[in-house]
Amino acid sequence: MAITKTSTKIIDNKSAAADDSTSLSDCVSVDLTTAIQMAIDVEMIFNASATYGAMVEVYASDDDTNWDTNPFEQFPVAVTPGATIREHFVMIPAPKYIRVKVVNLDPTYSITAINVYSIPQVVS
C-alpha cells in the first residue's frame, strides 16, 4: 500500500473584482473518492491599497454536476496590501467532489493572479 500526494492546479490565474469572486466554473473538479486527507494551497496578489482580505470557499457535489448552494468549508485569507500571498489549508475529504471559489471581500480593489492547487493524499 502506497500513499501519494499530487499537487494539481485547479484555478489558473484568475482575478476577482471588488466585492466579487471567481466562479465555480473557473475551477476544475477534484475527485476525493480515494483521498484520506486533503490540502488546498491558494496564492493571490492583493492591490497595494486593499484593506480587506479574501475568503476561500469549498463547494461539494455527489455527482460532479450539482453543487451545494452554500460552502462545505471556508478559509479566511488576511489582506497583505501589495503582496503576493500563499496559504495552505487542510480540510476533511468527506465530499465525493469539490470545487473552490475565491471571494474578494474588498469593496474597492481587485485581487489578481489567483491560483489554487489541490493536494489530495491518496492510498493506492
Image (tube, rainbow, N blue to C red):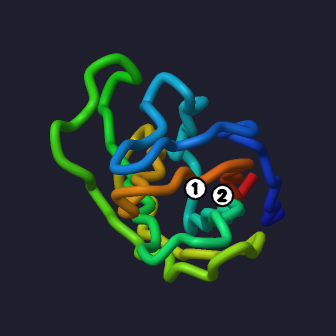
Disc 2 is placed on an element classified as strand
- Which residue is at the front of the view, 104 or 65? 104
Residue 94 vertical position relative to residue 64 in the rendered view, above or below: below
- Name the residue at 55% across, 37% down: 31
Distance from disc 2 to disc 1, alpha carbons, whole Å, reads 6 Å
The x and y percentages for residue 16 are 51, 43
Regarding residue 76, the answer to whether it shows in the image is yes
The x and y percentages for residue 43 are 71, 62
The x and y percentages for residue 11 are 66, 39
- Name the residue at 32% across, 63% down: 73
Category of crowding for the residue at label 2, using alpha-carbon neighbours closer than 10 angstroms: few (below 14), some (14–19), many (at least 20): many
Residue under label 1: 35
Category of crowding for the residue at label 1, using alpha-carbon neighbours closer than 10 angstroms: few (below 14), some (14–19), many (at least 20): many
The x and y percentages for residue 88 are 64, 76
Residue 99 marker:
none
Residue under label 2: 120
